[in-house]
C-alpha cells in the first residue's frame, strides 16, 4: 500500500466516527443526489390535485422542498401557489390544495442546500413582471448561469434566490420582445442540462435542453396534457405516456392551443447515464426502456464480464436490488437479502451518539447475519463515489460473518463531476478520479472489485444505436461532456 | 330614520351573521390596523437576540409574520436571515437565533395580506445585487410606488413581492451611483410615510420620511445603537432612549462610523395622530409624551367637552382603558370593568357556529353583567371606523342590562382614508365620511355620542405648539394630507 | 439587618440568576397558582362546543392541560373524550370537537406538574368499572387522599395518575352500593376543598365540598344546565347565572331529572379568600359580588388604612389593576400605567441569557420610565409569597427612576400554606410566615409596606355577615383551617 | 356463479368506492395486522437510547403509538416514561430520550384502535400499586381477559384502558403474595398468546405464553440483556442473539441477578405461522430460521406444487418479494418489478377524491405497464383475507396490460380468525372460510389461483420435525387452536 493510500486509509478508519453524523447528512447512503423533479398539467380542472400525486411519485428526486403553482384562467389568469420545506405529503393538506384553483399547473420537488435560503429557493419560482405573473420550475443546471448573472447584476437586476432559474426570468423580463420570443432567446443563450416548465397568466412553455440531458416526458389524461420528469408520475395519475420531450424542443401552449418547435438544431442526443443507473425509479421508462429491466441487464452483463464463484448475491438497497437479481439470474447463485434498509428512517431521526455507533448501533442499513454468516458474498452496488460508503457496507457484511465480499458495480468508474444537475463532489473527492481499481478495492476492503464496462452499460440500456453511446451522456465515466463546461464554476445544481 | 339609514341598519342586522367571519378577520375588534414595526441594531454581538426581544415588544404592530436579518462582519459581511408566519415567539427558537450571527441586524413584524404570498412578503426583504447583499425592513407606505413599479417593470424588472419596499431595492440596484447616493436618490424619488432600515454587507441606513409620519426612535445600549418603531422596545432590552429620528433624516453607518444628514429640507412635521390615539403601546412615548398619560388626557378632555351624568365609566379594552380612567378621574364617576377581553383568544381559535353565536356565545369580548346591570354606562372607545363594531359593543352592554349607553370617542370623526401605512377601508365605508354624528348615534344604538374635538385632541398630546397642529398628521380627521396622494391607487399599506 | 436577613438578602441577590429560569417557571410572576377549573353541561346538543368556550373562559385557572368528556345518550350512553397538553384553543380543533357527540359533558383545565405524567393526569379522568364508564373532573384538593390511597392500594387497587381524583373513582367502584349511594359515601369519606363533576353513562353528579371552599356555580341556557367554576364562563356562552352550588350540596341528574340534597349538614361556610383577591377573573362574581368591584374596594380600603403621599399609583398587572384604581379613586393620586406586561409572552418564549438579563433585557414586565421617573410611586399588589417577585418589581421601578416606592398589598400577610387546591410553597418559604412586616419591607427594598387588615379585606368582600369571617376561609392569613389538615402530607393540589 | 357470489361480486364492484377510505384504513394494503412489538433492556446505561433504536427496528409491528419506560436504580428506582401517538422517530426527540434515565427499560410499539382512547392504550402501561410502580409491555392477546375483567370489575376494579394488559396489572396488585409469586399466579391464570415485559422499581420479568405463540428473543450487549420481539432489533443495536425465550418460560431479574423457570409445563410448542409468512421482517430469524430464506422456500415450493407457464413473476410489495424471487429461481421465469409501492406514502397522505380514483389516480401501489403489458404474469402474495385487496391488485395488473394473471399464495387458505394477537376480521368476512378456491379465483378475477399446501408451508419453515407441525400454530389454516378459545369474545388483539 502506498503512503498516500495508507494516509487515506487512516483517514477513513478514524473517519469511522463520522458514520451517520450530522443533520441531514446520511453517510451510509452518501450517494449522488438527483436535484429535482418537475410536473406540469395543462387543461385539467384538478390540476393541483394531479400535481400533488404526480410530485409524490417523483418524491425520490427531491425530498427537501416542494411547491405547486396554478393559473386560474376562469379568474383572469390569477396565479395561486404554495411552497414549503418537506415532503409533498407534509407541505400540502386538503385546504392548501383546494386553494390552488386552476386548470394549469407547474410543480416541483427539490433538494435544498442548507441554510436560511432553503425556502426562498423552493420552486416553482414566481415573479411579477411587465406582463403579469411568471412562474418557473426547473430540473437541471445552467453551466453559464454565473456569467449571465454577473451581466444582469451589472445592469441593475436584483436576485432573491441562488437558483439558476432566476436568471431565465430576468432574461425574459428584460427582453423587449414578446414573451415566447423572449423565452426562446433565453433558451438559446443558456448552456446546460435542464427541463423547464414556464408559465404566465395566459401561456405555458415546456422545454428540454439541446441534448436531452434531463428526462422529461409527455402524457395525456383525457384531453389534458401532463409533463413529468419520469413516467412513474404518469402511471400514478392514470395518464397515458405519449412520448419523451425531444432534445432542444420547445412546446408552447397559448390561446391557439399547443405548438411545438425546435429552438436549436439537434447536434447530439445525450441522456444522462446516471438516470438509468441510479436516479430514476425502477418502474419508470426512459426512451421506452423500463429501468428495472435495464438494471437487471446491467447486473446480468456484469456477471458475464466478471463472474466470481460465491454463495449468495445481495444488492445494496434500494437502488441495486434489480441489478442483483439480474446477476443472480445470470449466474445461478441465489439472490438473498444480505442487506436491509429500515424504511422508517428519515430526516427527523435521532442519530446514535458516537459511543453507541462504536458499539454497533445502526438504524439505517443492516447486514443480515443469518444470510451472510460463513458465506462468500457478491455485493452489487450502482456506483462508488468517495468510497467511504462502500467500505462501510463491506465492513458491515464482514462483521456479520461474510467470509468473502466481492463488490460488483453496475456502472463504469465515476471519475468526473457532473455539470448538469447532479450533486457530485469535487473531482478530487471522486475516488475513481485518482485511484486504480486495485487501489479502490484495497480501500473499500473488498476481496475483488469490478466495474461494468462502458460497452456493457451501453448494451444494457439498449445497444449502441447511434454515435456517442446511443445518445447517452457518460461524461462522468468518459469525460466527454456534450457542452462546453466551466471547470472553475460551482458545478452543483441550482435548480 | 332616512331610507338610506334604514337600509344600512338592515344590512347590519342581517350582517350580524358575519360576526367574526373569515380567517384572521375579527369583527368584534374590527379596528384600524397598524401595518408594521421595525427594529435595528448596530454594533452589538447579540444583535439577533436583542431583535427577538425588541420585535416581541413591537408585536402589537404586526402579528402575522416577522423576520430578522443579521450581517456577520467577522465572516466578510455574510447575511443570515430567517422569516416566518406567526408571532415572534413562534417563528424563532433558540437554534434559529443562534444561527443569526452578526453585530448588526434589521428586523420586522407585519400584518400580511391573505393568500399564498404571505410568506413571500415577510420582511426583511433580502436581495442579491451587483455589490452583494441588500436587506430592507420598512414600516409605512409609498404613495407613488405603483407608478415607479410600472416604470421599473417596463425596463425589465421582476418582482417577487407585492411590497412597496421592493421598489426601493430596484431603484438602488439600477442606479449607477454608489450605494449611499443611490439610496438617497431613491428616498428623494418616493413619496409617502415610512421608516426604513436598509443594510448591505458593509453599510446600514436608517431613514424617516420627510414629514416624520411613522414613528422611529434611536436608543443606545452601551456602545451599540438601537432603532425601533416605539420606545417600549428600547425599554424591553434595557436600552436608553436618545431621540426620535427626525423627519427627512438619513443616518448612515459605514466604515467611518455614523453620519447623519437631511435628504430633504423640512417643510412640515406631521406625526400620525392615530399612533397617539390607538396604535402605539401605552408605555411608549412619542415626541417625549407617554401615551398612557396622553390618552388619559384625551379622556379627561372628552369629559370636559361632553360630560354626561352616569353611574359607571368603562373602556373598550385594551386600547381605551387609559382614556376611560382619565374620563373617570375628571368626572368622579367610578371607572368599572364593564367590558372584558379574553386574553387567550388568538388566531387559532375556533369560531362559534352561527347558531351558537345567535345563542349568545362570545369568547372575545364580554360585558360584565354585575357591573352594568341597571346602570347608566359611559363607554369610551378610541375611534369609529365602519360603526359595526361600536354597535355590537353597545348591544353587548344593553343585553347585560345597561339602561343607558353613552359613547365617547377619544378622537375626532375618522372620515378620510390613510395613505401612509394604516390599513383603512375605502372612504365610502368610513361611516364618518358620509353620516352626521346624530346618524351615527342612531346606527350604533347609543343614547348619546360625542367625539373629541380637533383642538381637544391636539391639546391632549401637548398643545398646538406649531403650525399644522403641532406637527401632527390629522388627515384622517381634517383631510389635510401632508403629501400629494393618489386617490385612485390602492392605499393599503404594503410595508 | 439581622444575620439571617443578610443571608436571605444575599441569597436573593445571588439568586438574581434564577430570574425566569426553568420551563414553565415564571419568577417575575411567581404567583400563587389556582389549580384547576371545571365546566359541565347537562341537556344541550352542543355540549362539547359550549364546553370549549366555557373552558376557554376559565383558561386562567389552568393553562397546561385540558379535556372534555361527553356522553352520547343517543348512542347508548357511549363516552367520547379528548385530553391534551396546552391551551384549550391548542388542544381542540373542529374535528376533535365534532367527534365529541353528546348532550352532557364535563370539562377541565389544569396546571400539570412537570414530567412524563403530565398528560396522564389531564382531566377529565375516565375509567371503566363494573357499571360502565365513569368520568370525573375536579377542582380542589382532598386532604386525606394519601391515607385513603394507601388503604386502597393495600386492598389491591392500582393507580394510573397521581391525582386525588382517582381515589374517588376507586371508592365508588369498590362500593357494593348503587352508583349514587356509592358516590355519596365517597364524598362523606373525603376531607378537603373541591368542586366535583362526575358522570356515568346515565347519570351526572355535581358536588361542592362541605365548606364551599372552591367556587362552583349553576347557570341555565334555555332548558340546559351549566356548571362552572366561575360566572365568567356562563357569560361567555350566554347562559344565565342561577345560583352558587351550596357547600355540601350534591346535585344528581338521572332518568327522573334533577335532584339536589345535602350530603353533610352545613357547619361552616368558608369560601377561599384568595379567589376574591387574586384567582377569579375580575368579571366573575362570587356569592353575587363582582370581583373587579370587590378588588377596587380592597384598594380603596387599603388607602384608608395606610395612606401615603405620592405622585402616582400603579398596579402590578393584571391582577392588581382593579385595586390600584380603587386606591387612586380613594386618594385622588392619579392612577398611571407604571408597569406593563407583554401580552404575547407565553410558554414557548425564549428566556434571555443570564448575560442579557444582567444587561436589563426584560420581556414580560416593564416599568414605564416616562411615568415613574422622578416620582413617588404607590405600587399595589395582591400578595407577597416568597418576596422575591416583589423585590424584583420594586427594583424595576427604581431602575426606571422612581424616587420612592410604597408597596401596598390588598390582602393580609400570607403566612400559612393552603391545603385546598392552591399551589403554595412550604410554610418555611412563605416570607410572611417568619418575617415581620418591617423585615419584609427591607427585603423587598420598599420605602414603606403595608398589608390590608383582615377586617379591611372582609368588609371589602361584603362585610362580616356571619360568623367565621362571613363564610370565608382565610386560613392562609389566620391559620384557622375549616377542616382537619395533615401538616405532614404533600399539600399541593392534585386535582 | 351462484347468486350469493353474484351478490358478493356486486358488493365489491360497488364497494370500489371504499377504496382507501377512512383515516388509517388502507384498503389496497388491507392486510392482516401484527399488533405490537416489545423491546426491553436490563443493565445498560443507555437503556432508553437502545430502546429507541430497537423499537425503530420493530416499527413494522406497530406504527400508531409507542412508548418507553425506564427505571432509574440510581434514583431509588424511580420510573421515567414517555408515550405518544406516531412513529418512534416522531414521538421521541433528544430531550425526551435524555429524560428517560435508567439502566432498565421496557418499550412498545402498537397499532391502536381508532377513537379517543388511542393514547390511553399506548404502552408500556404504568401503574402505581401497593409496592410502588408497575410497568407492563405486551405483544399478544389474552383469550380469557373478558372473563377475568368482569370478575375484577365485580370486585371494584376500575380500568383506564381497553387493553388486556391491564388485567394482569390488577391480578398482580390484588394478590396477597409477593410480586414474583403474584405475577406467576397471573400468568397461570391467563390463557392466550403473548410476550410480556413487566417491571417494578426493583425487578423485571420476561415471559412467553405456554405455547410460544408470539416471538420473543434474548440478546446480549456486553453484560446487558436485551429482549425483543424479533432478532432484527438485536442486529440494529449490535447485540448478539442468544436464544429464543422458551414457551412457558419466566425470566426474573431481581437483586440476586437473573433466574429462569417454567411457570407451566410444556405441552405443545406452537409458533405463529403468520410470523413466518408475513409479519416478521425478512432479516429476522425465528427459531434460527431466516425469514427471507424461508419465504424464498415458500415461493420455490409453491412453484413445484402449482407451476404455471408465464412470462414474468412479480410479488406484491413489500412482503412477497422474497417469495416471488424464490418462485422465479425455481421456475426460471424472470422475476420482474411488476408492482411498485410508493415508499413516501403514509398516514398523513391526502386520499384522492372518488372522482380522481375513478380516473385511475393511485399513489400507493402501481402496476408497471412496461413490465406487464402483453405478458402472462404470476403474481405472488402472502395471503388472501377478504379478497378485495387481491381483486384490486389483479385488476391493476390487467389495466396495465397483463394478458393473464396467475395468483400464487404463499400460505394455505386463511379460514379461521386468530385469537392470539393478530387483528383478523370475523370468520364470516374471511373469504376462505366460506368459499372454495375456484369461487375465490372468480371473485378476485384471476386466471388461476393456488395456495401453498400445509405440508409445503411446514417444510419451507424447516420441516415437520415434531408433532403438531413442528411446533407451529396453524389454527388460521387448520382450525387447530393450541388453547381453548372463546368464539364469542372479541378476538381482536388488545396488547
Image (cartoon, coloured by chain):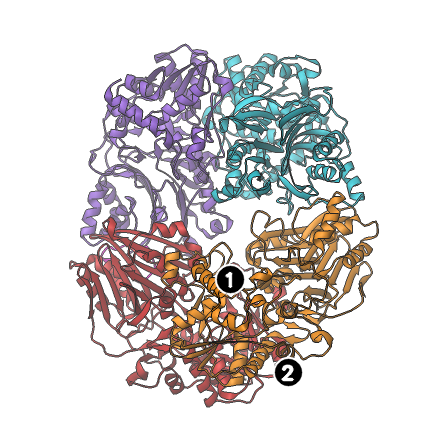
Chain colours: A purple, B red, C orange, D cyan
Determine if marks 2 and 1 fall on one subunit: yes
Q: Is residue C98 magenta?
A: no
Q: How many marks?
A: 2
Identify the chain of the residue marked 2, using the numbered disc in the image: B
> What is the secondary structure assignment of the residue under circle 2?
loop
**Spot occupied by residue C343 in the image (x, y as percentages of width and height):** 47, 65
Q: Is residue B158 magenta?
A: yes
Residue C189 visible within the image: yes
Residue D162, quarter of the rendered image: top right
CA neighbours of label 2 inside 10 A, class few (<14), some (14 to 19), many (20+): some
Q: In front here: C120 or A24?
A: C120
The kind of secondary structure the magenta stretch mainly shows is: loop
**Spot occupied by residue D344 in the image (x, y as percentages of width and height):** 48, 37
User: Which image quarter is the N terminus of chain B in?
Assistant: bottom right
List the residue tagged with mark 2: B374
List the residue tagged with mark 1: B346
In the displayed orientation, state which residue is furthest to the top. A309
**Spot occupied by residue D321 in the image (x, y as percentages of width and height):** 52, 23
Q: Which residues are magenta?
A: B154-164
Q: Earlier in the sequence, mark 2 or mark 1?
A: 1
In the rendered image, the vertical position of residue C368 relative to residue A79, given as above or below:
below
**Spot occupied by residue D120 in the image (x, y as percentages of width and height):** 64, 45
In the rendered image, the vertical position of residue D227 relative to residue C323, given as above or below:
above
Compared across the picture, whether A353 is left or right of D218 comes to left
Using the numbered discs, state the Cα–Cα distance from disc 2 to disc 1 in whole angstroms: 32 Å
Compared across the picture, whether D487 is left or right of A479 comes to right
Amino acid at each position: 500500500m502506498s503512503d498516500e493510500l495508507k494516509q487515506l486509509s487512516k483517514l477513513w478508519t478514524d473517519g469511522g466516527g463520522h458514520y451517520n453524523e450530522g443533520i441531514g447528512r446520511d453517510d451510509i447512503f452518501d450517494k449522488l443526489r438527483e436535484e429535482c423533479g418537475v410536473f406540469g398539467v395543462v387543461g385539467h380542472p384538478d390540476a393541483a390535485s394531479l400535481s400533488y400525486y404526480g410530485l409524490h411519485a417523483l418524491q425520490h428526486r427531491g425530498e427537501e422542498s416542494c411547491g405547486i403553482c396554478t393559473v386560474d384562467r376562469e379568474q383572469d389568469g390569477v396565479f395561486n401557489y404554495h411552497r414549503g420545506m418537506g415532503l409533498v405529503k407534509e407541505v400540502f393538506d386538503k385546504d392548501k390544495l383546494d386553494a390552488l384553483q386552476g386548470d394549469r399547473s407547474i410543480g416541483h420537488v427539490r433538494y435544498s442546500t442548507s441554510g436560511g435560503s432553503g425556502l426562498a429557493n423552493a420552486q416553482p419560482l414566481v415573479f411579477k413582471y411587465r406582463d403579469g405573473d411568471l412562474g418557473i420550475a426547473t430540473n437541471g443546471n445552467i453551466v453559464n448561469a454565473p456569467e449571465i448573472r454577473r451581466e444582469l447584476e451589472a445592469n441593475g437586476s436584483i436576485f432573491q434566490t441562488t437558483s439558476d432559474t432566476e436568471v431565465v426570468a430576468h432574461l425574459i423580463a428584460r427582453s423587449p420582445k414578446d414573451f415566447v420570443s423572449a423565452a426562446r432567446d433565453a433558451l438559446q443563450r443558456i448552456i446546460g442540462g435542464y427541463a423547464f416548465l414556464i408559465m404566465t397568466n395566459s401561456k405555458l412553455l415546456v422545454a428540454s435542453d439541446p441534448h436531452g440531458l434531463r428526462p422529461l416526458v409527455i402524457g395525456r389524461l383525457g384531453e389534458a396534457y401532463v409533463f413529468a420528469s419520469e413516467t412513474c408520475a404518469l402511471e400514478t395519475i392514470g395518464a397515458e405516456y405519449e412520448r419523451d420531450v425531444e432534445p432542444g424542443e420547445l412546446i408552447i401552449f397559448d390561446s391557439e392551443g399547443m405548438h411545438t418547435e425546435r429552438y436549436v438544431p439537434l447536434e447530439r442526443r445525450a441522456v444522462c447515464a446516471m438516470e438509468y443507473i441510479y436516479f430514476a425509479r425502477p418502474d419508470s421508462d426512459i426512451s421506452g426502456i423500463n429501468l428495472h429491466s435495464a438494471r437487471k441487464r446491467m447486473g446480468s452483463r456484469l456477471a458475464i464480464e466478471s463472474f466470481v464463484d460465491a454463495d449468495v448475491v445481495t444488492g445494496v438497497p434500494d437502488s441495486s436490488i434489480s441489478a442483483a437479481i439480474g446477476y443472480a439470474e445470470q449466474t445461478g447463485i441465489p439472490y438473498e437479502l444480505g442487506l436491509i434498509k429500515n424504511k422508517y428512517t428519515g430526516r427527523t431521526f435521532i442519530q446514535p451518539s458516537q459511543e453507541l455507533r462504536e458499539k454497533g448501533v445502526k438504524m439505517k442499513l443492516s447486514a443480515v447475519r443469518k444470510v451472510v454468516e460463513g458465506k462468500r458474498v457478491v455485493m452489487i452496488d450502482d456506483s462508488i463515489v468517495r468510497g467511504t460508503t462502500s467500505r462501510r457496507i463491506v465492513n458491515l457484511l464482514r462483521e456479520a460473518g461474510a467470509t468473502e465480499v466481492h463488490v460488483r458495480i453496475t456502472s463504469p468508474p465515476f471519475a468526473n463531476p457532473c455539470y448538469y444537475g447532479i450533486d457530485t463532489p469535487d473531482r478530487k473527492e471522486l475516488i475513481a478520479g485518482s485511484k486504480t481499481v486495485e487501489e479502490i478495492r484495497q480501500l473499500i476492503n473488498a476481496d475483488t472489485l469490478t466495474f461494468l464496462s462502458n460497452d456493457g452499460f451501453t448494451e444494457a440500456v439498449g445497444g449502441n444505436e447511434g454515435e456517442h453511446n446511443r445518445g447517452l451522456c457518460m461524461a462522468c465515466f468518459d469525460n466527454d461532456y456534450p457542452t462546453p463546461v466551466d471547470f472553475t464554476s460551482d458545478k452543483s445544481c441550482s435548480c
